[in-house]
Amino acid sequence: MNFILPEMTFLRYFIPLVIEGNKRNIKSNFYWYPSNKYNCPRKNMQELINLSNKFNFNLFEISKLQDTQDLTFLVEGVGLDYVKSKNTVSLTCNIDYNALYPRYKDKVKHIIFPSKYFTEQKISYKGKCAVFDSDNISCLGSPKYDVEIDGCRAKSKFNLNDNDKYCTIILPKLRDAKSINFNVIIKSLKTLGYKIIAKNRAKEGYSFQEADININDEYWFPHSTMDLIHISDLVITFGSLAIKECLMLKTKIINFDVKPFKLLPELYTGNFCVDIKDKNYTEDDLIRYHSLLQNINNFQFDEYIKKYMFPPNSSKRILDHCQSV
């Protein structure tokens, strides 16, 4: 199997497929090229080499890619111009397919969507909503979630104490930060006894001094965001698509609805999520909202996973499907 890697972010989707391929004695080859972004493989080469050794995949520059009929994986068709094989699979990423799908829909053999729910989203991009009607679409899940997160490893990596309870705040874009009363949020979390972890993307370029710990994209697989969600007792977001990770990892969430638009709105309606639209909240309000999450159990997550997401073992389903067609 071949994987086209212009961004380290894609490793979240590719390595679970590599692991499944290893079980089938299928060798995996990664072909990288520089994107010059913060997540560029060239800028993260040592970690990429370490991962190739750990998960037993070969690593090549894109110029080494040959004309082959081996199964070749991409994310949102990125890098398709380098690929000569017709046996191509494009995985969808977040909701980027709304913009990118029209560019690759007729150029790849397989398009993998997480679930039917995602094909039904009507999200405008440059005034147009993509219609996902290609015969080559299969709703098989996302390999991104086929990862076993070791909570002890993650806590050790961030030097966290087993006796503390943690809230991860997934920081918003600077565009949205000005409409958030962080002082009230911090005070309420401290009153509730949380240690606060602020998670930002490296490309945003700002930190949050009020947090106990600040973390950017420290490593790429398992991704630091998923590690933090897994080990947190609570996650706070501001319209982030991390709502999907919170749901799949069964972590309670408080969301502040500050974005000018809302993506995947149904995911915010579960009892495991408090969705705050009022911008004039007080510390007492947030403590009261927090109390609504105290009796949440796994069943309430499972109900939404079944309705909107997908069951485990996406990587197995994807390889089964692509090898049989």
Image (cartoon, rainbow, N blue to C red):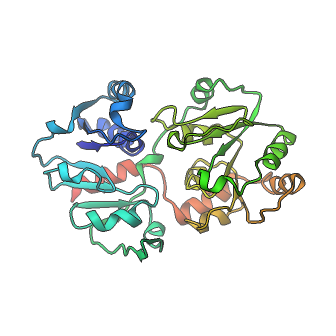
Left or right of 96 on screen, residue 257: right
Left or right of 61 on screen, residue 239: right
Left or right of 94 on screen, residue 69: left
x, y percent for residue 105: 27, 66
Residue at 55% across / 40% down in the picture? 205
Q: Quadrant of residue 216?
A: top right
Number of marks in the rendered image: 0
Q: Is residue 20 above or below residue 128?
A: above
Q: Is residue 272 visible?
A: no
x, y percent for residue 224: 54, 36
Image quarter of the C terminus:
bottom left
Residue at 33% across / 25% down in the picture? 49
Of residue 229 and residue 185, the one placed in the foreground of this image is 185
Residue at 66% across / 48% down in the picture? 251
x, y percent for residue 306: 55, 62
Q: Is residue 8 visible?
A: yes
Image quarter of the N terminus:
top left
Q: Is residue 320 above or below residue 3?
A: below
Q: Residue furthest right?
A: 284
Of residue 48 and residue 126, the one placed in the foreground of this image is 126
Q: Quadrant of residue 212?
A: top right
x, y percent for residue 68: 11, 46
Of residue 36 and residue 307, the one placed in the foreground of this image is 36
Left or right of 153 on screen, residue 53: left
Q: Is residue 137 above or below residue 291?
A: below
